[in-house]
Image (spheres, rainbow, N blue to C red):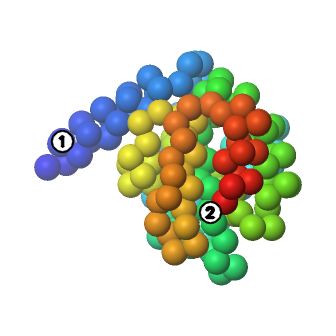
Amino acid sequence: MKTIKLLLAIILSATLMCGCSGNKQEKNELSSSAVPNVVQDDEISTADVDSTSQEAKATPEEKIVVLDFFATWCGPCKAMAPAMEKMEKKYGDKIEFRKIDIDQELQLAQEYDISAVPTLVILSPQGNVVDKKVGGQPEEELDRIFGGL
């Protein structure tokens, strides 16, 4: 059983890596209990918050939540990061943005069926998936998406 789980984890990891151009520079240890919060760093990294993956689905303010699944080695993820920061500043009053490093949060990536990065998962205030955008999105498209929420 452990062998099957390990094999599935390896297959998912390989699938996720194929979805993004760029070279993987470093593999970080997996953490299944911490859900990353929004990162405001030029180098994409993960900020750990003491919460569970279930808490990623809802916020105390009952805001819409955008989970931005990325990888530190992903070129399109790095290219989209400045636009996402602008979106957070513009729509942060009604939308909670959270960055999820797939190398740090493999279990959460599996839960949301992430097959490529970057991927945006939009959750209702109740925690239901309402939309999923796979691949890099230009700033104009992000503004259209988030402006309509």
Mark nearer the viewer, 2 or 1: 2
Picture disc at residue 21: none
Q: SS at mark 1?
A: helix
**Image position of 5 (left or right of 17):** left
40 up-or-down from 119: above or below: below
Residue 119 seen in render: yes
> What residue is drawn where x is 74% and y is 54%?
147
**Image position of 146 (left or right of 122):** right
Residue 109 % position (x, y) = 45, 48
Residue 57 % position (x, y) = 52, 68
**Image position of 1 (left or right of 54):** left
Picture disc at residue 65: 2
* Residue to which mark 1 is pinned: 3
Disc 1 residue type (three-letter) = Thr
Disc 2 residue type (three-letter) = Val
Q: SS at mark 2?
A: strand
Q: Quadrant of the C terminus?
A: bottom right
